[in-house]
Amino acid sequence: MKKALLGLLLAAGSTVAFGQAVGSGKGEVRRIDTAKSTIAIKHGEIADLGLPAVTLVYDIPANLLSGIKPGDKVSFTAKHENKKYIITEIKK
């Protein structure tokens, strides 16, 4: 049954990894808070995460912030876990 559900989700275009929703997007960095390890990105819709076009604050590991600054155009991958959105990859 779980395999069938996973197959249906993948066929519908969703990406699921270990029960987490994962999606990719492109947008513009608006703010960075290095003390809190967060980044605000204004981006288009990310259907795999159920997000409309919005400016959203994501948690991000501090090591991924190197070289990223407000105003940068970025592409990124994020996951939704424990009611938080977390950037797992980001590049200019």
Image (cartoon, helix red, strand yellow):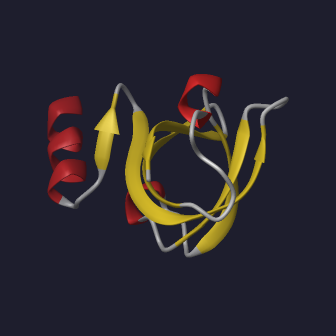
Q: Position of residue 9 (x, y in %)?
A: 25, 51
Q: Position of residue 47 (x, y in %)?
A: 40, 65
Give the residue at x 64% y 65%.
71
Q: Position of residue 68 (x, y in %)?
A: 59, 46
Using the image, determine if residue 63 lies above or below residue 89: above
Give the residue at x 78% y 33%.
34
Q: Quadrant of the N terminus?
A: top left
Using the image, determine if residue 6 lies above or below residue 64: below
Q: 90 or 88, which is in the foreground?
A: 90
Taking the view exactly as shown, the residue that stands out farthest to the front is 67
Taking the view exactly as shown, the residue that stands out farthest to the right is 35
Q: 59 or 68, which is in the foreground?
A: 68
Q: Is residue 80 left or right of residue 62?
A: left
Residue 1 seen in the figure: no
The total number of labels drawn is 0
Residue 86 seen in the figure: yes
Q: Is residue 29 left or right of residue 4?
A: right
Q: Position of residue 62 (x, y in %)?
A: 65, 25
Q: 71 or 85, which is in the foreground?
A: 71
Q: Is residue 34 left or right of residue 80?
A: right
Give the residue at x 39% y 44%.
22
Q: Is residue 90 left or right of residue 10?
A: right
Using the image, determine if residue 57 lies above or below residue 42: above
Give the residue at x 15% y 40%.
4
**Residue 16, quarter of picture:** top left
